[in-house]
Image (spheres, coloured by chain):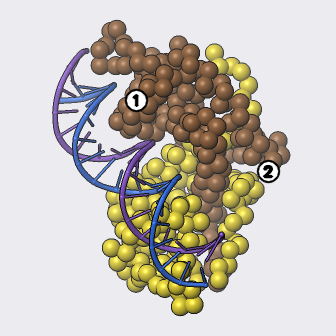
Chain colours: A brown, B yellow, C blue, D purple
Amino acid sequence: MSGQAVPPALRAWTSLVRAHAVTGHELKAQLQAEHGLTGHDYEALYLLARADGQRMKRVDLAERLMLTPSGVTRLLEGLEEEGLVKREQCETDLRISYAALTDAGLEKLEQASCGHEGSVRSVLERNLSKAEIEQLVSLLEKLPGGDDGASCPGV
Amino acid sequence: MSGQAVPPALRAWTSLVRAHAVTGHELKAQLQAEHGLTGHDYEALYLLARADGQRMKRVDLAERLMLTPSGVTRLLEGLEEEGLVKREQCETDLRISYAALTDAGLEKLEQASCGHEGSVRSVLERNLSKAEIEQLVSLLEKLPGGDDGASCPGV
DNA sequence: GAAGATTGAGTGGTCAATCTTC
DNA sequence: GAAGATTGACCACTCAATCTTC
């Protein structure tokens, strides 16, 4: 049963989805348990920390996180209440507001990132050699979404 | 700025997450728009169609879909209302119930799978060569979750 | 009129508690 | 007491509608 040949492209997608699900699930649980952060919380803090002036337009944040505008509003709502992010306004265009990292937010990120990045490296390096990891990167970066990292310098 | 070397393992995870997010987003939108199915709806029908007797224990379905028991209850609630899935009981153990594919469910899956699988192949084969896809499969299957496909023969 | 942001209603999931059957 | 399933309360997000500013 089920001996029919599955096209490699379908197997690739299936295994990508499962790898993401299994590992992502574990990583999110860890962030939640140890730091009270959701995956999006962490990613937002991470992006802000590396952004110019440690702040981003909310609309750009939405795009990077693959959230809708309202999703970002609600995400930042929580982070602002915890004091990890603060709101800043653009002086020349009152429509635009920025999300800016606070000192507490940076500290929180630093606390979380060590363990998180360690877990990520652990999963990858436990199952793949150095060369295989490099291969994997170069393959994945050819897929949609793989080229977005360098561009979008912001304002 | 940000010229510091990022470990390859982190780049691998980042690109995997983004590839999954971007392509997965598109695929889900397509399923929803063309067939009124969520990603989990589709995957459930897919798993049931390939299961022995075209039915699975709800608890096994939960594990494969990475859902909690209550998540499965609610997922199947919807599919039962649409007549795509029906409930069956185990005769020897009254605690267990099965989710079984109906004729309508199989038909729905066949309608959806053609376009869906075509989209998956299109994305992969547009960006990677045949050899690269094979490479990608073998790398991803070494990660957690990559070996689950063959096992779990069920009852 | 278009862009950014927010709000209300709805969806798809989780967790904790409960019920039944083993 | 443990396993399977369900329920109620809640959470994170989406969509459609609205408001403000350009």
**Label 2 – label 1 distance at C-alpha:** 38 Å
Looking at marks 2 and 1 on the same chain, the residue that comes earlier in the sequence is marked by 1
- The kind of residue tagged 2 is Asn
Residue at 61%, 50% in the rendered image: A25
Q: Which residue is mark 1?
A: A77
Q: Is residue B113 visible?
A: no
Residue at 67%, 68% in the rendered image: B149
The chain identifier of the residue carrying mark 1 reads A
Q: Position of residue B6 (x, y in %)?
A: 72, 29
Quarter in which the C terminus of chain A is drawn? top left
Q: Which residue is mark 2?
A: A127
Q: Position of residue A42 (x, y in %)?
A: 57, 33
Report crowding for label 1: few under 14, some 14 to 19, many 20 or more residues within 10 A (C-alpha): some
Left or right: where D6 falls relative to B149:
left
Q: Position of residue D6 (x, y in %)?
A: 42, 70
Between B141 and A6, the one nearer to me in the picture: B141
Can you tell which mark lies on residue A42? none
* Residue A2 figure quarter: bottom right
- SS at circle 2: helix
- Give the answer, above or below, for where B86 lies relative to B134: below
- In this figure, what is the number of numbered marks? 2
Report crowding for label 2: few under 14, some 14 to 19, many 20 or more residues within 10 A (C-alpha): some
- SS at circle 1: helix
Between B97 and B37, the one nearer to me in the picture: B97
Residue at 64%, 74% in the rendered image: A5
The chain identifier of the residue carrying mark 2 reads A
Q: Is residue B122 visible?
A: yes
